[in-house]
Amino acid sequence: MLAAALDAHFSAYDMPVQHVSDCWREWCEIHQRPPHHDELRLLAQAQIMRIGATPDAPVLIADTTPLMTAVYSQLRFNDHSLDSLALDHQAMFDITLLTGLDVDGQQGDGANERDTVDQTVRRLLNQGHLPFQVVYGSGKQRLENALFCIGQRAPEWAKKWGRREQTARWRGPCETCGDGACEHLLFTALLKP
């Protein structure tokens, strides 16, 4: 899991980190089902409260945010009522990382479902004018690509963990590039209505 790998990396460099776990995943494990429509707002608010209750630290890693609850609400119930709540909350973060579709991290969803979720997340972030970086790869490469994306958005953080500034990182075909800004530019035009 990328959030746990980032937590371990920053902690290894003595950067105080707060890692906020996913209310959604915990809720589904407890109830053994996905939430019903009338439960979504409370679930989104619970995630906001969990993030807000986190002690101050230079680095806050939220495994997920209410953005994913809003996406679920759109896709399952054609309900956009959580969009503004999710976007307002997402705007508080300095960096938003999305995992590329080369990693099967979508809890049993098929390829079509993952594509639809990915497109909806990107559309919602673009609607809110919120920048994001896309992270590809698996294992150590995935962590390195995430750190590269973070370093591009926050070079002062990269210096804390001993990384020299990098301006470009092309190493081959787009699938192995790891430069989220590059991928973002390539696909942003496709998301415009």
Image (cartoon, helix red, strand yellow):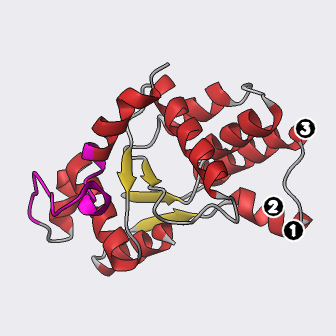
172 shown above or below 96: below
On the image, the x and y values in percent for residue 133 come to 36, 47
Query: Is mark 1 in CB contact (under 8 Å) with mark 2?
Result: yes
Residue range in magenta is: 164-182
Q: CA distance from mark 1 to mark 2?
A: 5 Å
Q: Quadrant of residue 145?
A: bottom left
Name the residue carrying label 3.
Answer: 38
Query: Is mark 1 in CB contact (under 8 Å) with mark 3?
Result: no
- Observer-nearest of 73 and 95: 73
* Labels 1 and 3: the sequence-earlier one: 1
Q: Amino acid at mark 1?
A: Ile
Indicate which disc residue 27 carries.
2
Q: Is residue 180 magenta?
A: yes
Q: Under tag 3, what secondary structure?
A: helix
Indicate which disc residue 30 carries.
1
Does 39 sit left or right of 64 as displayed? right
Q: CA distance from mark 3 to mark 2?
A: 14 Å
